[in-house]
Image: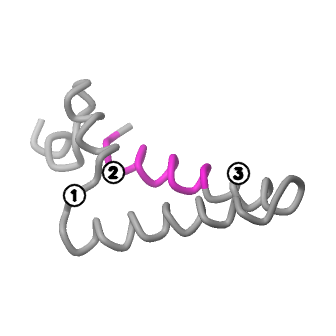
Amino acid sequence: MTVERIVFVFAGTFIMLSLALSQYHHIYWLGFTFFIGFNLFQSGFTGFCPLAIILKKLGVPTESQKVNS
């Protein structure tokens, strides 16, 4: 898997988890959903994604590295 795919999987998982928690535990979990959505939104414009930085430091290849190898 590549950095980009892992970021999508993490974002989708945490959005579904926080939506479920907002239904079964407390409505304030929707704030976490907003945080994830806002982070995805800003990373689309700035290219800054904390999870992607961590994954790259751990040696996970990006899409461009995988295509070039």
Q: Which residue is mark 2?
A: 4
Q: Earlier in the sequence, mark 2 or mark 1?
A: 2
Image coordinates of residue 57 in percent, x first then y, are 20, 29
* SS category of the residue bearing label 2: helix
Q: Check contact, mark 3 vs mark 1: CB within 8 A.
A: no
Q: Determine the CA span between mark 2 and mark 1.
A: 12 Å
* SS category of the residue bearing label 1: loop
Q: Earlier in the sequence, mark 2 or mark 3?
A: 2
Residue at image point 22% right, 75% down: 45
User: Which amino acid does the dot numbered 1 rest on?
Assistant: Phe
Image coordinates of residue 39 in percent, x first then y, are 39, 64
Magenta residues, start to end: 2-14
- Of residues 30 and 37, the one drawn nearer to the viewer in this rendering: 30
Q: Earlier in the sequence, mark 3 or mark 1?
A: 3
Image coordinates of residue 67 in percent, x first then y, are 17, 46
Residue at image point 57% right, 56% down: 12
The chief SS type of the magenta part is helix
Q: Which residue is mark 3?
A: 17
Residue reaching furthest to the right = 24
> Crowding near pointer 2: few (<14 within 10 Å), some, many (20+)?
some
* Residue 6 location, quadrant: top left
Image coordinates of residue 56 in percent, x first then y, are 22, 35
Q: Determine the CA span between mark 2 and mark 3.
A: 20 Å
User: Which disc number belongs to residue 48?
Assistant: 1
* Residue 27 location, quadrant: bottom right
User: Which amino acid does the dot numbered 2 rest on?
Assistant: Glu
Q: Check contact, mark 2 vs mark 3: CB within 8 A.
A: no
Residue at image point 61% right, 50% down: 13
Residue 1 belongs to the span the image colors magenta: no
